Image (cartoon, rainbow, N blue to C red):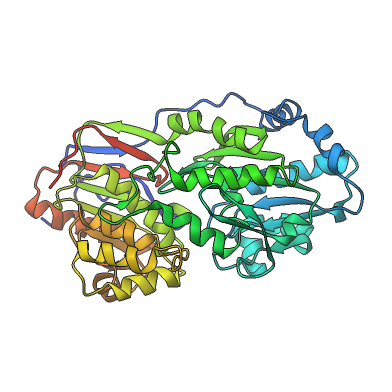
Amino acid sequence: MKLGTGMDFHNTPLNYGGDEIDEFIPKSIEDVTILQVDEYTPDFTDFEKKLIEVMDAPVGSKPFNEFIMDFYEEGKRILFMVDDKTRPNIHTKILLPLVADRLMSIGVRKEDIGIIISSGSHVPASPKEVEERILGSDLFKIWGTQVLTHDCDSGNTKVGETTRGTPILIDQQVLDSCLLIPLSDSEYHYFAGQAGTVKLFCPGIAGRETIRVNHPRMFDLEKGFNEGCRLGNCDGNPVIEDMVEITTMMKDKIPIFCFDGIVHHGEIVYLQAGDIIECHKSASAPLRELRVVDVDEPADLAFVSVGKLGVNLYQAGKGIHAAWNALRHDRKGWIVLLAPCEDGIGSSAYEEAMHAAKDLEVRDALRFVIETYGSEETFKIGNQKPPDLFRILLDVAEGNIKVISGLDPVELRSIYRMEGCSVQNADEVQHVLRELVSRFLKDNPNPKIYVLGDPGLLINVKNQIHN
């Protein structure tokens, strides 16, 4: 069945990089659903008024002005903590100028304000990337000279251990500050449960040893991941509980006033401020409303776009994970991922482990990568991706994850066990999508199709189909 001119198509827009791609599923297929949450109404209409409200009546903290003046001294640095270049940073661009203006209006000198990029063990951003991916050109002109870079391998000081035995190494630039202002956007996370708030500290400004001991708590040799380490779950999740403990200990060392938002369709629709642990807890309820979609049956074919997270395969894996939750788990379904991956794979650790396991069967590869790359001695960021992929490949057959990108199809198939559908630009994507639908229909004439434009959604399937 060739799809093309003269056919009617469903309106199922997905993002490829910055371009919208639509009309690739023919209307002859009846069971097509765009997975999205119900309409969400924020508890505010005036964002700046809401910001003033949460500053003046924060959770678990004194009001902002009073808090700042209790700890600020002229010549001492107040440090904003912001996300790195792998995150959209919509909230950063909105919050930073408003909060900075408030600081200066109550007597904080501009030269006493710094910004540290909480990059964990990711590759630090270049000045150009700080301008283009984090601050934007206008803010970069004002604050670019006051941006600090975190290096997980240098300049970190041990300040203690968690009850689980995780050594806590923190960037000395953070420790030298008189007050910290994390600018967070809470999201669901595929193994930490919930991103934002405490993750700005671990892995954000933590030393490699801290990350290397904390993150392997996610692994299970048979299942891939610990049962508690899943999208949206913080209860009984040893990774996020360790991060909360690290951040709680940091609160005792340095005053912290957190701003936390939830971004939905490019806008901040939820905002809280004050104590960082209380902000972490407070985000749970709105995230459930904004990020969980309940369905009765799994998809036969799931399309997923990761938007701006599609800069590399490492980040785009969040889309594969989200689609896997929505798909049937009997190795008969397909996932189609749209992600340009202009920065390539995005993680040398991910590449190394996948290359090392390339000749092993999936279940053997799962155990191998955890034993070899997932211990406290060997772990580094990127090593969590192979176990996540291999556990997905237990349910989705090799080659049944289709990746539309600029990546090499041969490498995708031989190393990452996905089918690569190479395109030179966004103009070619619709044609490739139509070809994939045509191929799937040959053996599956009446499929259930889900279209997922937000990789941050958790799809709860009531009646999952297993092997």
Q: Nearer the viewer, residue 214 or 50?
A: 214
Image height check: is 268 above or below 354?
A: above
Nearest to the observer: residue 29 or residue 110: 110
Where is residue 234 shown, x and y percent of the image? 45, 38
Q: Position of residue 223 (x, y in %)?
A: 27, 51
297 vs 314, left or right, is left
* Up/down of 149 relative to 308, above or below: below
User: In the depicted view, which residue is nearer to us: 30 or 317?
Assistant: 317
Up-down relation of residue 45 to residue 324 (above or below): above
Name the quadrant containing residue 434: bottom left
Left or right of 272? Residue 327 is left
Residue 344 in view (yes/no):
no
Frontmost residue, 352 versus 211: 211
Q: Quadrant of the N terminus?
A: bottom left
Q: Is residue 448 visible?
A: yes
The answer to whether 235 appears left or right of 132 in the picture is left
**Could you say which quadrant of the image residue 400 lies in?**
bottom left
Left/right placement of residue 60 relative to residue 234 reads right
Tag count: 0
State whether residue 368 is above or below residue 177: below
Identified at 44% across, 29% down, the residue is: 289
Q: Residue at x 47, y 34 (%)?
A: 287
Q: Position of residue 132 (x, y in %)?
A: 62, 61
Give the image location of residue 254, x and y in percent: 75, 46
Instruction: Identify the residue at horizontal 74%, vertical 60% (top origin).
Output: 173
